[in-house]
Amino acid sequence: MKKTVEIIVHTFFWIIYTAITLMLSKVYLQAKPDAPFSDQLVYVISLELFMGLLFFYITFWGISWTKGKTMRVAILAFILLFLLLFFSYPAMRIGVWEVMSSILPHIILVFLAAIFRKFSDSVQLEQEKQNLMYQNMQSELALLKMQLSPHFLFNTLNNIDYLVHTDADKASDTLAKLGAILRYMIYDAAVDKIDLCSELSQIEDYIGLIKLRVKDEKYLKYKLSGNCQGLRIAPMLFVPLIENAYKHSASKEGENIISLEIQISGRNLLFNICNAYKPDEREPQKHSGLGMNIVKRRLELIYPNRHEIIISTRENVYTVELSLELDENEMHSSR
């Protein structure tokens, strides 16, 4: 993109330069019909354009070549001075005005080339800075995903270890669901964004895994509304929030201990999860653990200015409300 813009700017500049040279040459030759080559306008324009290109790009590329080296700077200055004297020499036989009119345009081109070089370097520096920031962000996101998987796996394996001794069949079902979720995490979720419907399907499997850990089928109440078609989301964004709600809930048995609702309206998604916590946990948000920190950091990196997360406690209920502006699938958005 940067190269394309630079080529367009240079092309536009030389079109203007050629037009100005043509206009000034016509005026000069009309004022002095006895001047050399007064009847060869095309030759004069071609020579001026060649000289302009030579001075401009020797300076433009020469500045990058010198890079502050004293000897190279001296060589570049010598080349430019030699060319100035070489092209202005024929005009010395005519007069001082002709010499000045021959030298000044090329000096101006040298300064313009230096300005173009400085602008080009600044654009390139900014682009390199943006690329570095993007690479750092991608590296950090990869690290966060690596942290998320062991965190989730550690909590689940603890529960499976308990089920192996209390209910072998339920432990087997839990392992099967865990295997499906891990396949999703390793293979399907290895991208920046994933289909929202696929992510919601995995959440339902994960909820099923939680329900295998508890006795009451109505322990977790889940409600989904809206259309998930044509939308994409960062993978594994909600699992830590659900895991934290289960981990820090007041009880591991009973009805409606955890309430989860996901609302989809256009490109906007609202995720709301709340769980009862024990009254002696005065600041339950401090117990959110690694999972919550990962979610917050991923939101900052992936959805800057496109998300809002609100954590509140009221009447022994801990609530996390997350609103997101999602991306559309390319095929869906082009329709």
Image: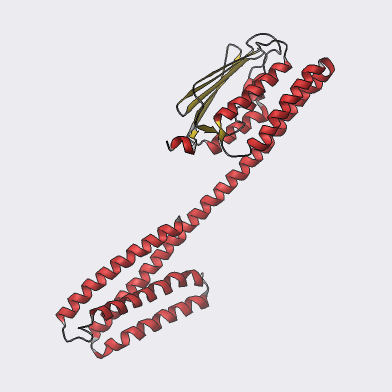
Query: In x, y percent, where is residue 1?
Result: 45, 55
Seen in the picture, residue 96 relative to 161 is either above or below; the reply is: below
Give the left or right position of residue 298, taking residue 264 as reference. right
Q: Residue furthest top?
A: 254
Give the left or right position of residue 173, taking residue 141 as reference. right
Q: Residue furthest bottom?
A: 93
Of residues 158 and 173, the one drawn nearer to the viewer in this rendering? 173
Q: Residue furthest right?
A: 165
Of residues 293 and 179, the one drawn nearer to the viewer in this rendering? 179
Q: Quadrant of the C terminus?
A: top left
Q: Give me the residue at 80% from left, 17% from top.
A: 169
Give the left or right position of residue 277, taking residue 223 as reference. right
Can residue 204 be seen in the rendering of this structure? yes
Query: In x, y percent, where is residue 220?
Result: 64, 14
Of residues 258 and 106, the one drawn nearer to the viewer in this rendering? 258
Give the left or right position of residue 291, taking residue 90 as reference. right
Q: Give me the residue at 26% from left, 91% from top.
A: 93
Q: Quadrant of residue 206?
A: top right
Q: Quadrant of residue 208?
A: top right
Query: In x, y percent, where is residue 281?
Result: 66, 16
Q: Give me the residue at 82% from left, 18% from top.
A: 168
Seen in the picture, residue 21 relative to 293 is either above or below; the reply is: below
Query: In x, y percent, where is residue 298?
Result: 58, 35
Can residue 148 be seen in the rendering of this structure? no
